[in-house]
Amino acid sequence: MYLKHNTLGDDIPIGIVFKAMGIESDQEVVQLVGTEFGMPSRYAPSLEEPVRERIYTQRQALRFIGAKIRANQRPGMGYNNAR
């Protein structure tokens, strides 16, 4: 599962989004998302993405996402504020 947004150059794995929101353990994710039939197997691969990217903390996740923001979407870099 991925987060897609027009300000991001790439889709962001949802596991990294959870970490960016301060939810740093897989157990917390399971508690928030739920364990209804089939649900854990749907998002389990997403929980592996942060490990592959070596993202373990909220700060690392925020930096990862910040690096994906398109240049013309960053503050001070819009069409009216071109530098």
Image (cartoon, rainbow, N blue to C red):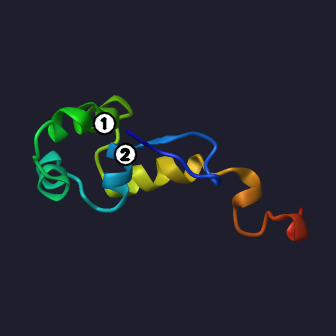
Q: In which quadrant will I find the N terminus? A: top left
Q: Is residue 50 above or below residue 36?
A: above
Q: CA distance from mark 2 to mark 1?
A: 6 Å
Q: Is residue 34 left or right of residue 79?
A: left
Within the image, what quadrant is residue 22 found in? bottom left
- Please say if the residues under marks 2 and 1 sit with CB atoms less than 8 Å apart: yes
Q: Which mark is residue 12?
A: none
Label 2 Cα crowd, 10 Å radius (few <14 / some 14-19 / many 20+): some
User: What is the residue that sits farthest to the front in this orientation?
Assistant: 37
Give the residue pinned by disc 2: 14
Q: Is residue 53 left or right of residue 45?
A: right
- 17 and 66: which is toward the camera: 17
Residue at (34% x, 29% y) in the render: 52
Q: Is residue 44 above or below residue 32?
A: above
Q: Where residue 21 sits: x, y (%)?
A: 34, 62
Give the residue pinned by disc 1: 46
Q: Amino acid at mark 1?
A: Ser
Q: Is residue 72 left or right of residue 48?
A: right
Q: Is residue 25 left or right of residue 81?
A: left
Q: In which quadrant will I find the C terminus? A: bottom right
Q: Secondary structure at mark 2?
A: helix
Q: Amino acid at mark 2?
A: Ile
Label 1 Cα crowd, 10 Å radius (few <14 / some 14-19 / many 20+): some
